[in-house]
Image (cartoon, rainbow, N blue to C red):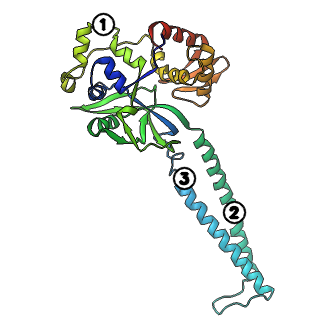
Amino acid sequence: MIEPITLTVAELAARWGQTPRQVLQFALHKCFPMYFYFDGLVFDAGDEWHRANGAWLENQERERLEKSIAAGEAQLKRHLQYIQGLVKPTEWEQPMDTDAVKAVRMQIDEDGAQLRHIRERLKVRDTERLACSRNGLVRAMPGTLQSVLERGSEPFPRWGYRPGAPVKIIERNGNQQHLDGHIWALEDARYPKELLTADDLQALMTDIKDIETPATKAPAPNAQSKTLAGSSMDNAEPSTSRHTLKSRSKAILHAEIAEACKLAINPSDTTSVWTELVKLSEKKFGCLIGPDEKEIKYQDGEVVRSFRKRNLSERLARAATRGDA
């Protein structure tokens, strides 16, 4: 039996014998990753040039140059009409001499060169923006989870964490946590959604199994139930237990492989999933950098690593036997 790649909050609550509210409280307190689906454009938080208002100054300059060129051409056209005797100058106008005509023409040419350069930059920017398309999961930020927990819904997020990128706690103040991670700005959703609710949140099965089966010591079923259940979750102190993954590459790539399985015609077939994973790497999905002959390069912290088709086959084989990808 092939297990699902993700579980919704309601499905996770049923699995753990909890309420959806308790699941959200657990996710907030334990920094457990929850995701939501987004189909649109994503940009690094510091990438101001490609974000919605990043070209504001360039657009202002483009409009100024267009007006300057139009005014200069109108001035030359009016002068030509004077020469041809089609119009007479008013008492506030003086016909231009040769030097004045040359100066206007030089200004028009100079503005035109700048305008062409700006238009080319904006055209390239539009193309690069479209290349930042995302159709998949985005990790919800703590503020998003807090709002859903307190009010039942949140205006659809404009920010989120990049899946697969490490997120760590840099400050903890009571129930409030400040995290450090790779933040995405979310824009231009293809199917805009006004609100995000608990029904839109989901967890990866790999993350679920990581906390259900710690590598250090497997807790007894009743102990695990006590940890997740009841009001003790609301006021629990931060856990000091450490769970070790078999491979850091697994933690880095699980979101990308999960997305490839979702897109594949046959998610249990290595070739089908590999084809979609290559396509995702070409789009630089998550931590993927791009295909390189028979490998896919991906970013693991400061190191660039390689992932081969046989590695994917082994991962899918483990998923079929243990439900772990």
Q: Amino acid at mark 2?
A: Gly
Q: Which residue is mark 2?
A: 112
Q: Is residue 253 above or below residue 59?
A: above
Dot label at residue 218: 1
Q: Which residue is drawn at the image coordinates 34% and 16% (left, top)?
A: 211
The first of marks 1 and 2 along the sequence is 2
Q: Give how far apart the Cα atoms at labels 1 and 2 are.
A: 71 Å
Q: Amino acid at mark 1?
A: Ala
Could you tell me residue 16's position as x and y percent?
A: 30, 18
The answer to whether 258 appears left or right of 297 in the picture is left
Choose between 31 and 209: the one closer to the eye: 209
Q: Which residue is drawn at the image coordinates 51% and 42% (left, top)?
A: 191
Q: Is residue 90 above or below residue 271?
A: below
Q: Which residue is mark 3?
A: 55
Q: Quadrant of residue 100?
A: bottom right
Could you tell me residue 266's position as x and y percent?
A: 59, 17
The answer to whether 312 appears left or right of 107 in the picture is left
Choose between 248 and 229: the one closer to the eye: 229
Q: Amino acid at mark 3?
A: Ala
